[in-house]
Every structure is written in C-alpha cells, then in structure tokens.
Image (cartoon, helix red, strand yellow):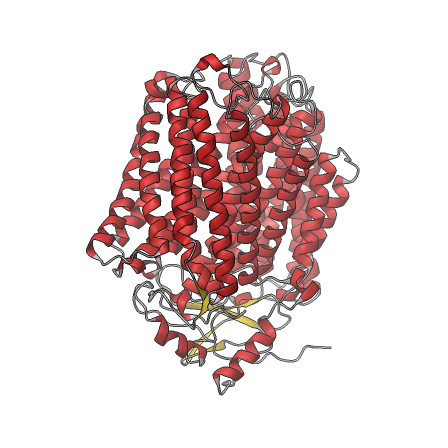
C-alpha cells in the first residue's frame, strides 16, 4: 500500500493565534513522563545549564572542604586518602561537569534563536548528549559518595594512575566516567557546527552572523580536534589497566610521558574552549549595555580563529620540567606568550566599545567589570608562567593554582553570571528585582581575591599544590587561613547569587519582549520562547546584531516570514548555503521520542559493564546501543520522491532528503574529522614511543603479516568501490551494497587475523600499538558492513531511490574514510618494525 502524497504547498494560518496553536501542537514537548521524550532545544539547553549548576554547587562544597583542611597546619579534618579524592573530584567537576556543559547549554538554548532557526540540526542528538552527560556525571558523584572516587588528580598522571600504584577502581571511574561525559561534548560540538553553518535565516551570510555564533563555531571546531586525544588516552590507559597492554609502562617499552602529551593536547586548548564561549557572551552583552555596536567585529573574528590555532601549539606549556630539549621549550614558550595578542585584541575591542558608547551600570555590567579586573591579572600571571625560568621555579606550586583560578573564574564565572542576569529574563519572561544582586557580586569579588591572591604568595614562598598538610614552621599558615576565610566569604556570595536568581524566577516583573533594547534575533521571540521559537523565519539583510527585535518579532509571529505555516505535520526549518546564506533546502526535524533516553541508558550499561569488569555484558550493551541508534532513522526518511517545497515569498526548496549536502552529511564529515584526530593521536603515540620510550628497539618480535595485510587491503578497496557504485544511477544498488558488505567482512576478518597473530602484545608497547591499530581498522570495517547492510534494508523498504540516495552517500563517506585509514593502519606495523630495527630514543 503506497503512502499518500506529501503536500508541497501551504495554506496561510490566517492569524497569529491560529498559527501559534498549529505550530505548538506539533512542536510541544509534552508534560509529565513525556518530558523524557523532549528533544526541543529550549528544554535541552535549560537542562544542561541547571544540571551544570548543580554540579557547580557540589564542586563548591568540595572546595570548602579543601580550604577547611588547609586553613591550619597539620589539620586532621581530612586524611590523605579523603583529601586526594576531594581535590581530584573538585577539579573533575569544575572542568568536565560544570564549565563546558554550562555554556553548551547556553549555546543550545540561544543559537537557534540568534540564527533565525526553529531548532538545532539534530535535536535527538542534543537529548542523547544531555542524558550521557547526566549519567556520566552521576557515575562520578556516586563514586565520591561511596568512597571510590578518582584520587590521582583531575589530570590522572601515569604511573600514579596505573594498576601497580592505583589497584582499586578509583582510576577506572575517572577513565570511563570522563569518556562517557565526552560523548556529550563531541555530540554537542558536531551539533553546534552543523547548526551554525547550515541552519541560519535566509540572507544571513557568514559576515552577518552574530558574534556569539562565531565564537561557538570556533569553540565547536576546537572541541572536535581537542577532545579525541583525551578520549584516546583514557581508552589506552583503561586497556592497560584491564588487559595489561603496556602503553605507559617504561619497563616494557611504554612511556608515562605519552599520557601527559595526550592529556595536554586536550587540556590546554580546553582553557580556551572554556574562555571563548564566555568571551562570546561578553561580546554580545557589552555592546547592548554600552548602547554601541561592537567595535572591531572583523578583528575579533580573526583573533578568535588565531587563538584557536595557537591553543593547539601550547600543550607543552604544562610540561616544561619533564626534560624536553631547550629548543622545543623556546618554541612553546614563545607560542604561550604569543597567545596574549589575540586575547588583547578582544579586550581592547570591548574597552573601545564601552569608551565610544554610554555604558549602563546594570548588574550584568557589574560582573563584566569583575571579569576585566580578575581575568587581566590572571592573564599577566599566565605570561609569567610562559617564561621557562620562572615556570621552573613556580611549577606545581600554589602560584599555578592561583593563576588557574584567576583565569577560569575571571574568564568564565564572572561572564557566566553576567550572562545569567542578561538572558535569564529571556528564559523566564521576568526581569531582575536586584535587591540582592549588588551585595552578592561584591561578596564574590572580594572573597575571590582574598582567597586566590594569597595563594600567589604561598606559592612564591614554596607551598606545593596537592598537599593535604604542612608543618607550622613552613610559614604558610597565616596566608592559608586568609585564603580559607576568603573562600567562605565567596561562598556566601554565590549563595546570595543563587537566591537572587530564584527570586527573579519567582517574583520578577513580567515583560513582553527585549527589555535591554538589544539588536539580536533571540529578543524577537516571545519570552519565555515557544517550542517552535519563531512563527515564521526572517530574512536578514544586515549584520544580525543591528536588527529591530520589537518590530521584527511581531511580523514573524504573524507568519509574514518564511515557513509561516504548517504542512504535513512536519517540524520544518530552513538550511542555507554555508557562506552566502542563500536558501538551500528545507530540513524536516524529528518529533519528540524516548529513543535518545533509552540509547543513553544502553550506553550507560556499556560503561558500567566495563567498570564492573562484567565483560560478557559489554558486547550485549554495545549491540543494544547500536540497534537503538538504527531505530532513530526511519522517522526521517521519505518513501516517495516529492517536488520542490514552497517556503514563502514565492521561493521553493527541496526536502533535505533530496539535497546534495544536508545537515546529516556534514555531521558525518565533522564526525570523521574528530575520528581522524583520534586516529592520528594513536599513530603519534606509536611513533612517540619509538622515539623516546625506554627499552626500544623491542626484542625479536615480528608483527608484520603480508598475506593478511594484502587480504585486508583488497577488502577495503572492494568496499570503497562497492559503496561508490551503489550511489550511481545504475539500477544495481543491492548488488553493489552486497559487494560492499563482502569487502568489509574480508577486511574485518583479515585485520582480526592480524590482531590475533601479533605476538606478545603484553610484553612490549610496540606489539600493543600494532594491536591497537589493527583493532581500530577492524572496528571501522565492522561499522562499514553494518552501514552497507542497513542500506540494503533501507532500499528494500523504499527509502532509497536514484533521487533519494542520502543514506548511500553517507555510507560512501564512511567507506572512503575507512579505506584511507585502513591503508595507513596496514602500513603502520611495517613502518614500526623498520624503525624498531633502527632503534629508538630509549
């Protein structure tokens, strides 16, 4: 039985009220248990922010325990084991569970509104990312409550975190919990990149984007490149702990420094990943409160792109004392100082905007001033630490702790509070009362500076970080007591901020639209915003921070923009050309569903089985997760070709299933980019061990297998050729997909044979590295076979035709990548074997 034809035209709603009811009936998330099925960006963004603030409160309590312990010498408040867990979890919560997730939530909430879209590109992926974040963070908090929390520092250095020195599951909780949480971060990065580049209002070219979108685009790209090395390092260390593969064991060809390289390849860019969203909020708030268009828009865009590039050349900034050659130290020291230039460009642009405008001394602006004072001081101490001689003296002292907090609290927490006071009226529809706002700010500001300025002094007087007690004769007690008093003052300030925001939500003055007289699109929506965001979509003819939300909002609510109607029960928004903003196609978004929640539950079961060493359960959980992901797809397909869709104003565009490069195609491109970064890090790890690890070259071990390698290469080529011809208009799609499946299976079996034949992978890191690469290639071949088989099923069910070939084109991208990565992976053992014969740096 064929489906009824889709409607391609539209019927005007007739009135704004009728249009609202029509759209809300389709877009609304429901109430009660139906909220578990919510995928709307309003709901998900608020969930991220609220959950992050809960974690922030937990991290703050842990900070108070640390300061209580250090307030006096030889304190018995916490013992060494308890203190190690407390200070580790404080860092883990603030870095992984609060800072980035909070601004992810803010971006998820704001960006569709700022860009003139109705939702994000992949609402279900946002929901899945949130549940992964919640479950992964809950793993870590539960471990703290049961006394098995990570205790090796938030950086988890080896060999301290290796099995001989951390035999319990504390380190496993960190490795698996953080990897689980990072799924959320990567999914958000892909979501934000695709949304910013494709789901903008017609006419919004790159040069017309709001500045906050530019910041989040750069941040998302940094997350794609920066997070995979950490995920890889976590996997390798967990594999070493669980299966004794010696990637970090110097007695068997490994090197603890490999962990530091992988960690700081993530860790130093993360500082800028945390700062840049906050800077984006400042670049949005300061012009509005100064009643002046942002000065140096183009220079700021160039500065944040430059900062992103420079941030990936600074990771050795944290490793000056590990014995790196002096020439390399000079390079990284210069790069560390150079990053101050793009930071300075942004600061001077903000100051110029305020100087040329008429700043309003509102509560958000008060927190902006707090940012300037604290962050600039933190930046100056950062330049000091960039200089190698000074860093050698201050390394691992409380001076570094103070610098870190001046940068992160100044560069993140004060902008966060400014953003909360600025955008909370949009979320709640109520304006601040401000009875407690000023006292709360001054308590936080004064308490913070007392706490961490004193830490600079204790650090300069030689106090190491991470110690839980110190002798009275050290001379640090007075300064530590002052720090502890200041920390409690700051905590009272944060409590007043929380109370003030609760009072705003409960008793604030109601308003209709745009209380700040801003010029960005988010204020063109009603407040609180409806589930569909805009009744119709605008056309942008100027930079999107100089609009008139009051006038534009009424026009859009009346349906006088694009897509100001309902059609086929679809949740529609527009995709545009990445550069010009020309209308490209209509994106039909998925309806609310419980699938993201259950998929995250299955993913949680996967990580829990690894943590509990229930390895028989791991493949069951993995297969269940994969099955649930595949269940996402039928609701987004078409079973018939349809004509161009009317979008309003006499224009037409194709359905996204008929477009050349819809959002899902770009999502896989960015996913493969992150994947390639992880793979490059894995290959880097193997060559790094050859170059610098002790006990190289390995003993007489041969892990090259020309016969299996040739068979695997043949399978990879066969799969790529089959995938390419399957997308051609040859009427033989099932045949070529079958060839693709065959090629993938040959490659999987051959690489599995290589992995099983590698001798003694537990005896030397060279064999372990070759095995890791073989597993990587085999896993990608397995996924390729599943994609090709799924393509056969989609073709049989009528979702694929010559015009509707999106599933096949996505599969072809995967197979092309797997073929290239597989060829490199097959060559890797031969290269490593040859280099091993030459000898390494050990």
Q: Position of residue 350 (x, y in %)?
A: 27, 50
The residue positioned farthest toward the bottom in the image shown: 14
Q: Position of residue 434 (x, y in %)?
A: 41, 58
At a point 52% along the width and 39% down the height, the residue shown is: 94
At a point 62% along the width and 53% down the height, the residue shown is: 128
Q: Is residue 20 above or below residue 617?
A: below
Q: Is residue 570 above or below residue 723?
A: below
Compare residues 669 and 500 and report the one nearer the observer. Answer: 500
Q: Is residue 317 visible?
A: no
Q: Position of residue 418 (x, y in %)?
A: 39, 52
Q: Is residue 626 visible?
A: yes
Compare residues 215 and 100 and report the one nearer the observer. Answer: 100
Compare residues 129 and 490 and report the one nearer the observer. Answer: 490
Q: Position of residue 725 (x, y in %)?
A: 58, 55
Indicate left or right for 438 with 741 as reference. left
Compare residues 699 and 742 and report the one nearer the observer. Answer: 699
Residue 378 falls in which quadrant of the image?
A: top left
Indicate left or right for 620 with 810 as reference. right
């Amino acid at each position: 039985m064929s489906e009824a034809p889709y409607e391609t035209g539209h019927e005007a709603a007739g009135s704004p009220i009728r249009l609202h009811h029509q759209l809300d009936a389709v877009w609304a998330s429901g109430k009660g248990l139906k909220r578990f099925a919510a995928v709307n960006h309003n709901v998900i963004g608020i969930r991220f922010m609220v959950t992050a603030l809960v974690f922030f409160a937990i991290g703050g309590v842990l900070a108070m325990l640390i300061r209580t312990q250090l307030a006096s010498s030889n304190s018995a408040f916490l013992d060494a084991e308890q203190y190690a867990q407390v200070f580790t979890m404080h860092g883990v919560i603030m870095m992984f569970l609060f800072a980035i997730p909070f601004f992810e939530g803010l971006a998820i909430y704001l960006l569709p509104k700022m860009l003139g879209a109705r939702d994000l590109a992949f609402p279900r992926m946002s929901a899945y990312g949130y549940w992964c974040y919640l479950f992964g963070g809950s793993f870590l908090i539960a471990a703290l409550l049961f006394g098995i929390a990570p205790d090796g520092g938030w950086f988890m250095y080896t060999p301290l975190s290796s099995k001989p020195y951390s035999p319990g599951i504390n380190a496993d909780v960190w490795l698996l919990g953080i990897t689980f949480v990072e799924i959320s971060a990567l999914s958000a990065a892909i979501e934000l990149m695709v949304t910013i580049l494709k789901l903008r209002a017609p006419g919004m070219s790159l040069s017309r984007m709001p500045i906050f979108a530019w910041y989040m685009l750069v941040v998302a790209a940094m997350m794609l490149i920066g997070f995979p090395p950490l995920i890889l390092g976590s996997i390798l260390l967990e594999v070493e702990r669980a299966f004794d593969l010696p990637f970090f064991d110097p007695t068997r060809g490994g090197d603890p420094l490999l962990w530091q390289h992988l960690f700081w390849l993530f860790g130093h860019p993360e500082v800028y990943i945390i700062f840049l969203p906050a800077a984006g909020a400042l670049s949005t708030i300061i012009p509005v409160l100064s009643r002046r268009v942002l000065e140096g828009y183009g220079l700021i865009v160039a500065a944040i792109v430059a900062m992103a590039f420079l941030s990936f050349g600074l990771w050795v900034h944290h490793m000056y004392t590990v014995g790196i050659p002096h020439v390399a130290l000079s390079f990284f020291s210069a790069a560390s100082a150079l990053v101050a230039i793009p930071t300075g460009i942004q600061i001077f642009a903000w100051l110029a905007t305020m100087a040329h405008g008429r700043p309003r001394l509102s509560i958000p602006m008060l927190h902006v001033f707090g940012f300037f004072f604290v962050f600039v001081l933190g930046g100056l101490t950062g330049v000091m630490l960039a200089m190698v001689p000074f860093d050698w003296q201050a390394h691992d002292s409380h001076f570094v702790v103070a610098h870190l907090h001046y940068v992160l609290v100044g560069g993140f927490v004060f902008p966060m509070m400014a953003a909360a006071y600025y955008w909370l009226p949009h979320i709640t529809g109520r304006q601040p009362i401000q009875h407690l706002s000023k006292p709360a700010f001054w308590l936080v500001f004064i308490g913070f500076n007392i706490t961490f300025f004193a830490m600079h002094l204790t650090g300069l007087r030689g106090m190491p970080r991470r110690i839980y007690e110190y002798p009275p004769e050290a001379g640090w007690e007075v300064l530590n007591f002052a720090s502890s008093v200041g920390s409690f003052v700051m905590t009272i300030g944060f409590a007043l901020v929380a109370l003030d925001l609760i009072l705003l939500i409960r008793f604030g003055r109601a308003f209709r639209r745009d209380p700040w007289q801003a010029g960005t699109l988010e204020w063109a929506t009603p407040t609180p915003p409806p589930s569909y965001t805009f009744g119709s979509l605008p056309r942008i003819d100027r930079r999107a921070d100089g609009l008139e939300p009051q006038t534009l909002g009424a026009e859009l609510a009346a349906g006088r923009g694009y897509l100001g109607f309902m059609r086929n029960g679809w949740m529609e928004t527009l995709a545009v050309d990445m550069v010009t903003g020309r209308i490209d196609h209509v994106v039909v978004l998925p309806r609310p569903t419980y699938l993201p929640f259950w998929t995250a539950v299955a993913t949680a079961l996967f990580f829990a089985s690894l943590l509990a060493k229930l390895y028989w359960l791991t493949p069951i959980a993995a297969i269940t997760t994969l099955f649930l992901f595949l269940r996402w797809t039928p609701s987004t397909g078409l079973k018939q070709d349809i004509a161009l869709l009317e979008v309003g104003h006499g224009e037409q565009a194709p359905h996204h299933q008929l477009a050349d490069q819809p959002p899902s195609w770009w999502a896989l491109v960015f996913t493969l980019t992150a994947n390639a970064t992880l793979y490059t890090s894995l290959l880097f790890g193997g060559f790094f061990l050859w170059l610098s690890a002790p006990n190289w070259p390995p003993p007489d071990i041969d892990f090259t297998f020309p016969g299996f390698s040739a068979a695997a290469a043949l399978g990879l080529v066969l799969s790529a050729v089959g995938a390419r011809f399957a997308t051609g208009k040859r009427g033989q799609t099932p045949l070529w997909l079958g060839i693709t499946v065959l090629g993938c299976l040959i490659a999987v079996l051959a690489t599995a044979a290589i992995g099983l034949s590698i001798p003694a992978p537990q005896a030397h890191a060279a064999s372990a590295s070759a095995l890791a690469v073989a597993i990587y290639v085999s896993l990608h071949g397995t996924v390729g076979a599943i994609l090709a088989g799924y393509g056969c099923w989609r073709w049989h069910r009528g979702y694929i035709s010559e015009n509707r070939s999106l599933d096949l084109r996505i599969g072809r991208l995967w197979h092309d990548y797997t073929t290239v990565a597989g060829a490199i992976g097959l060559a890797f053992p031969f290269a490593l074997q040859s280099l091993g014969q030459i000898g390494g740096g050990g």
